[in-house]
Image (cartoon, rainbow, N blue to C red):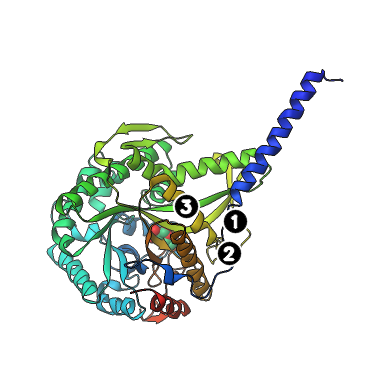
Amino acid sequence: MKLPRWVSNALLLMAGSYFLAMVVLEGWESEPVFSEIPADAGVTSLPKGFLFGAATAAHQIEGGNEHNDWAAFERIPGNISEDQVSGVAAGHWERVPEDIALLKGMGANAYRFSIEWSRLEPVEGQWDESAWSHYVDEINGLRHAGIEPMVTLLHFTLPDWLARQGGLTAGHFPELFGRFAAEAARRLGPQVNFWCTVNEPNVQMYQAYVQGVWPPGIRDTAEASRAFAGLVRGHAAAATALRKHDPDSRVGAAINLIVFDPDRHWWALDWIAASEADKGFNWAFYDSIKSGAVSFHLSGFPEIEEPLPELNGSADYFGINYYRRNLVRFTPSAPGLVALLQGPGQLSDAGVEIYPEGLLRLLRRVWQRYELPIYITENGVADNRGDMRPEYLRGHLYAVSQAIEEGIPVQGYFHWSLMDNFEWSEGFDHRFGLFRVDYNTLEREPGPAVAEFRRLSALMDP
Ligand code: FCB
């Protein structure tokens, strides 16, 4: 069959534009990053006052957290790898002074950790004085050691009384969380300058309400949207309470950011899928903060758009938790039409590509999008032998130093994690610690990256 001339011309034009567009997109993807990582990782160029430390979370290290939703979830067979439970975890509750000494010994000047709501308010409306004193002592101990605390209010775990009322999706969740934040500000505020309201709301929503593999184990997009909205409102309520107590405190949230690259550069649908994943996963939370409205627009999920004036200016910084890049392939047979693959680099023990350049790419995007100071609130690698971690640390710090040279205000870096710990669904299978924990004796032993951390911290301007 012979096509009319205008049809073949139009087809040719379309094909030509398609390839031109692909060449342009390819150019975007290969934005300049780096390949060689110098031994000093550029740390001498980090600004004065840069926070350099490690991060942890209460339920993962303390042990003895029996009254939150995770403790109940862990006891149900099949929920955690090999049915492990957090139990005594890394025994940190009994070892706070020892662990502060580890931080000091490795040259850290900052520490991000979470306070466990279920310990502090074990019964709705009743504060536990001894639990509050424990954290007051911990913060005093850190200050005494010259270590700046960054306190996270919600790192995935909810008191069981709140979980029974619907947890993140309960209508009064934001109010209860705001009340908890106000109490934390009143009791700890005098010694705390840096607050992180919620940790990885995007991951929590996805794991708990889309995949259903974290408590409450629900797979329902309407509930997922509601949980997301609850977390945004909770952040706003907490930020308001913290600011009321101390207008100078620095408040933000920690967002897990993933680099989503198209798997097949010549295939437009992979680009579209990558951009959808990027939009839905990476930016929804801070876009809400920026726009002053609880705003969630992801295909397949009920949409939300509700003004919330409290959100305006509710973040002084952007917290990035960076672990990975994924290649995105449009796959009609996959859930959500998208399959996530690993990139070509070395893989961690969690099967995740090690890709320090991705941190630089994300730092550029965060700065461009929000113009807020940035902290790397988490970055680390599942590495059971500990031999990938020194290079990992150096590579990612180099990404930070490159960003700073480009004028991006990155003000701190917290390595995940200080010590091995309870890694949620993976139980104790993945080791992320700078210090290795012997789970029989709970003794800590420095892994090879501790020496690297110390060496880099000594190069930094004090
Ligand atoms: C992050 C979590 C943290 C830890 C690391 C490995 O997503 O915030 O608690 O599990 O991953």
* Rendering coords of residue 189 (x, y %): 17, 60
Q: Which mark is residue 364?
A: 3
| Nearer the observer, 138 or 358 | 358
Residue drawn at the location 14% of the way across and 51% of the way down:
125
Residue drawn at the location 58% of the way across and 64% of the way down:
347
Graded by Cα atoms within 10 Å as few (under 14), some (14 to 19) or many (20 or more), the crowding at tag 2 reads: some
- Which quadrant: the C terminus? bottom left
| Nearer the observer, 415 or 45 | 45
Q: Which residue is mark 2?
A: 347
Q: Are marks 2 and 3 in contact (CB under 8 Å)?
A: no
Q: Is residue 255 visible?
A: yes
| Nearer the observer, 125 or 349 | 349
* Number of residue marks: 3
* Rendering coords of residue 49 (x, y %): 31, 67
Quarter of the rendering containing residue 246 = bottom left
Q: Which residue is mark 1?
A: 342
Q: Looking at this view, name the residue that lies furthest to the right.
A: 1
